[in-house]
Image (spheres, rainbow, N blue to C red):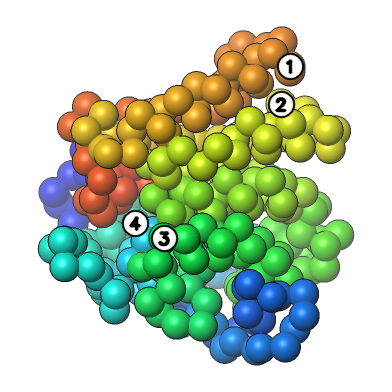
Amino acid sequence: MKKIPESYKEKGFRQGQIVDVRYDTWDKLHYERKETKIHNKALVYVPYGYDDTKAYNIFYLMHGGWRTEETLLRGEPGPSLPPWVHEQPPKYFKNVLDHAMEEGVIRPMIIVCPTFNNLHDTDSGDYDLAVKLTAGFYREFLNDLVPSVETRYHTFAEETTIKGLRKSREHRGFGGYSMGGVCTWQIMAHCIDIVKYFMPMSSGSTGTANAILQEIKDGGWNMNSFEVYAATGKKDFAYEGFDQEVKDFQAKERAYYHAEPTNIHYELSEDGVHDLDHAHEYTYNLLQEIWK
């Protein structure tokens, strides 16, 4: 696990842009009813020198509990931090992306930060509600978020129909930290036909990884159909549950496909704790591995 260079935390010479993209969706808890419309927002990182005549890989990056779509790229705290959380989100991650892409450490890509908050920005602070919202986010992701972003920016999707998104799945990834990692497993379960790369980080034990792999196998997907890049820290309170889940996933993958190595790549930080500085460190490391 590489540390983020301190120089990367300062503003770079070639700076990408952060753009607000707004789109309409529906109440996640009752999405299929389509009764309560929500005007939602995602933040989009557009790399320096973006050229709409070129196709770009795109990565969707989800925040964790007590946070919003503003947290990762702009460093804005969520409105519902409990009294025992004193951590203020670091504001340097956009600078890291600028430097890493300018120097070729990370391949230039579009990064989208959405939210699983539903009717209120405080939803992510309610653990039980957050689990339900991350479980249902895939409908919004598939039907509303992806088409809204990928009609505005030039990705490898020639069209944002299901056919077009499936055809371009090798150029699309999804990841998240903590509760965003829980959301990542759910996207893998429901949207593997349009996403190839998955990046769960320090998400605790969701108990879903084995079930997801069963669904993937039953759906006819082979090992070459997906890649999982996982990370956590040994001092993270989510370490034991997440570590066991990842290892169970690897073991089941070996049993299903009789192949080595497995398609889940696992990185550990010796001193990693459950905070946003380490979330940024993990993201910085894992994005280097995707679309090398």
Q: Could you say whether the residue bearing mark 3 is in a helix, strand or loop?
A: helix
Q: Residue at x 63, y 79 (%)?
A: 27
**Disc 1 or disc 4, which is closer to the eye?**
1
* Three-letter code, disc 1: Tyr
**Disc 1 marks which residue?**
257
Label 3, label 4: how far apart the Cα atoms are: 30 Å
CB under 8 Å between callouts 2 and 3?
A: no
The crowding category of the residue bearing disc 1, from other C-alpha atoms within 10 Å (few below 14, some 14 to 19, many at least 20), is few
* Tag shown at residue 97: 4
Separation of residues labelled 3 and 1 (CA atoms): 35 Å
Residue flagged by tag 4: what amino acid is it? Leu
In 3D space, how far apart are the residues under numbered discs 2 and 3 (Cα atoms)?
A: 33 Å
| Foreground disc of the pair 3, 1 | 3
Query: Tag 2, which secondary structure?
Result: helix
Circles 1 and 4 in contact, beta carbons < 8 Å: no
Mark 2 vs mark 1, foreground winner is 1
Q: Tell me where residue 72 appears, x and y as whole percent.
A: 34, 64
At a point 77% along the width and 74% down the height, the residue shown is: 32
What residue is rendered at 21% in x and 33% in y? Answer: 235
**Given this view, does label 3 or label 4 mark the residue nearer the observer?**
3
Assess disc 4: are there few (<14), some (14-19) or many (≥20) residues with their C-alpha within 10 Å of its C-alpha. Answer: many
Asked if residue 266 lies left or right of residue 194, the reply is: left
Q: Is residue 198 visible?
A: yes
| 156, 32: nearer the viewer | 32
Residue assigned mark 2: 223
Of the image marks 3 and 1, the number of the one nearer the N terminus: 3
Q: Judging from the image, what secondary structure is the residue with disc 1 in?
A: helix
Q: Say which residue label 3 marks.
A: 127
Specify the quadrant of the image occupied by residue 257.
top right
CB-based contact (under 8 Å), mark 2 and mark 1: yes
Q: Quadrant of residue 243?
A: top left
**Label 4: element kind:** helix
